[in-house]
Amino acid sequence: MRRPGILPTGSFKFRICLLLAAMLLSGCGHVNDGAQAKKGFAEANDLFHQGSYAASLDKYSEIIEKYPPAADKALFETGFIHAHPKNERKDYRKALEAFEKLVKDYPGSEYRQNAEMMVFNIRNVTYKDQTISAQQTHIETLQRGIQGRDNEIVTLQKKLEASESRIEASERKVEALEQKYRAYALQKGTIDRILIEKSARRMTLISQGEALKSYKIALGGNPVGPKERQGDNKTPEGIYTIDGRNKESRFHLSLRVSYPNERDRNRAKELGVSPGGDIMIHSIKNGLSWVGDAHSGIDWTKGCIAVTDGEIEEIDKLVPNGTVVEIRP
């Protein structure tokens, strides 16, 4: 039987961290504290995305010391880094200290409300964890002392089942908060890879190895196998990049995929044909946006990857040029 620790440990402290990160949905505001402060935030953010969490924290400490008007945002970001799942030195007490200092010292900050919610949720989950852990410890102690007493064992088993039900309820809440964390990561715009799985008709946005959001897609009208030649209505397979975009597209918005690559060109040369081109991730044809996600029920493109208008607008904001695109069969 699992026993959550009094402070978040093991798998539960990972969930606590996700709980923290999930609450940061509005933590992307801008601070107008001059060019140097903005430069400091940019450097700290770059270090964070490189996985250099200690260096990022040092940079935020420097901002707090040198640029007091920006200290509230720096404290908020400091709390986030202390609680980040991939930070091997994550420290939830320090995260709480950062959020509590923000609440106390910056009553007029735009980050105060989120910081108060962070503090409340960490304390609330920790308290529940302590209660469940104490109950489980008590039950296990009694179980060791009542061997052979069936009636008492049945009673204790019911208590144990009740505790497990409470744990499951907490896990469901954490799962919901994990989804909010993914939404926050999307808002931060950290996409570095797109995975397209043709057989599943699915496109997934990935950040630092973690899948953040998936979309239903439609493919070329002849979807099985890689694209070989111009006009075959096939969607390519292989490794590409986003190498441009068209905001005046006949399909609302479009991001260009760098097909053909060298392998595609060599294959077409061997076949004595043109490999074709103009493979895009785009939306529904202009004037037909009302079709919505029903479009993904059939493969209707000439080899491109299609999503809805709202989805392509989101993807356009999140995916920079140069992003790797992997297209699997």
Image (cartoon, rainbow, N blue to C red):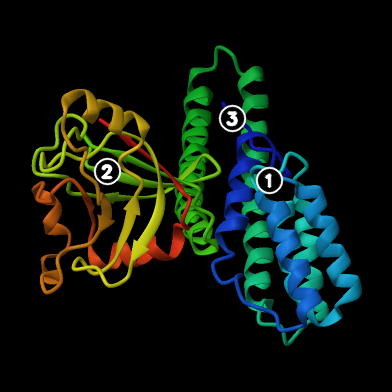
CA distance for labels 1 and 3:
13 Å
Residue 30, position as x, y percentages in the image: 64, 78
Residue at position x 85%, y 71% in the image: 64
From the viewer's side, name the closer residue of 251 and 273.
273
Q: Which residue is mark 2?
A: 202
Left or right of 221 in this view: 11: right
- Sequence order check: which comes first, mark 1 or mark 3? 3
Considering every residue shown, the one lying at the far right of the view is: 65
- Sequence order check: which comes first, mark 2 or mark 1? 1
| Crowd band around label 1 with a 10 angstrom C-alpha radius: few (<14), some (14–19), many (20+) | some
Q: Which mark is residue 254?
A: none
Residue at position x 71%, y 44% in the image: 87
Residue at position x 76%, y 70% in the image: 39
Identify residue type, mark 3: Arg
From the viewer's side, name the closer residue of 118 and 139.
118
Considering every residue shown, the one lying at the far top of the view is: 148
- Where disc 1 sits, the SS reads helix
Considering every residue shown, the one lying at the far bottom of the view is: 108
- Sequence order check: which comes first, mark 2 or mark 3? 3
Q: Which residue is mark 1?
A: 130
- Where disc 3 sits, the SS reads loop
From the viewer's side, name the closer residue of 12 and 157.
12
Q: Which mark is residue 2?
A: 3
From the viewer's side, name the closer residue of 61 and 49.
49
Q: Is residue 220 visible?
A: yes
Are dots 2 and 3 in contact, CB under 8 Å? no
| Crowd band around label 3 with a 10 angstrom C-alpha radius: few (<14), some (14–19), many (20+) | few
CA distance for labels 2 and 1:
41 Å
Relative vertical location of residue 4 with respect to residue 170 in this rendering, above or below: above
Residue 240, position as x, y percentages in the image: 39, 41
